[in-house]
Amino acid sequence: QKEVEQNSGPLSVPEGAIASLNCTYSDRGSQSFFWYRQYSGKNPELIMFIYSNGDKEDGRFTAQLNKASQYVSLLIRDSQPSDSATYLCAGPTTSGTYKYIFGTGTRLKVLA
Amino acid sequence: DAGVTQSPTHLIKTRGQQVTLRCSPKSGHDTVSWYQQALGQGPQFIFQYYEEEERQRGNFPDRFSGHQFPNYSSELNVNALLLGDSALYLCASSFRTQVLNYGYTFGSGTRLTVV
């Protein structure tokens, strides 16, 4: 089993809709998770991190963490064409506390 | 406040050659991690440097080596290049004790093409 898994997509949503991106992880000891956005050919940019069970909101973005189910999600409200990118989920491994493992990323397309 | 700087931005090398990629971390950061990102894939962890030592290593052969200098900058060296080494190489910097809260800051990457 991969340590961090994501559906590669593409996930297509109409402009203004809610985009829901999901990530599962295998290491029960993982404490915090990060969502990065990566435009084609560019470097990943950090958009949110979460380390507590529940929801964390930042503008149009909401991260959700469920440690019991080993599940992390990112919701993007009022999706815009500029949100079209690949979204990477990353979590640390407890065996190497400062090393982050990335999923393969989910490609999001917001249709105008 | 300078972000993470990587050089060069693009590089074309021939199979069997050696390459050195460079990274200057964000001001205030002391830890550098290197990732390889193949097309359509997520970044794969190569190794991490802190206090001028390799602290963590991913599943990469010994052809991949690195170094960290006293000013926290870092180099990634790849020997005996293979076609499969063609990828975007990302440098990620962090402040070690805060990485769990703040994650990495990535550089723009070096696009390596092996022909």
Image: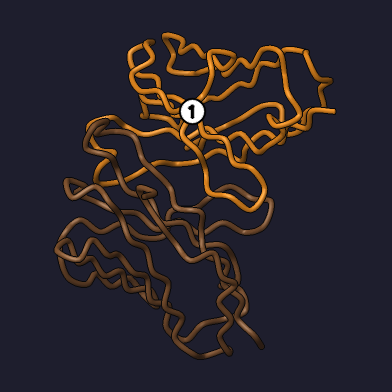
Chain colours: A brown, B orange
Query: In terms of image quadrants, where is residue B38?
Result: top right
Residue at horizontal 54 percent and vertical 64 percent from the top: A8
Disc 1: host chain: B
In the image, taking residue B60 as reference, residue A32 lies left or right, namely: left
Image location (x, y in percent) of residue A54: 17, 70
Name the side, left or right, on which B97 lies relative to A58: left
Q: Position of residue A84 (x, y in %)?
A: 60, 72
Question: The residue under label 1 is which amino acid type?
Answer: Ile
Specify the quadrant of the image occupied by residue B17.
Answer: top right
Q: Is residue A77 placed above or below A9 in the rendered structure?
A: below
What residue is at 46 percent from the left and 13 percent from the top? Answer: B68
In which quarter of the view is residue A51 placed? bottom left
Under circle 1, the secondary element is strand
Residue drawn at x 68%, y 29% is B85
Q: Decide: is B50 above or below A102.
A: above
Q: Of B23 and B81, which appears nearest the observer?
A: B81
On the image, numbered disc 1 is attached to which residue?
Answer: B46
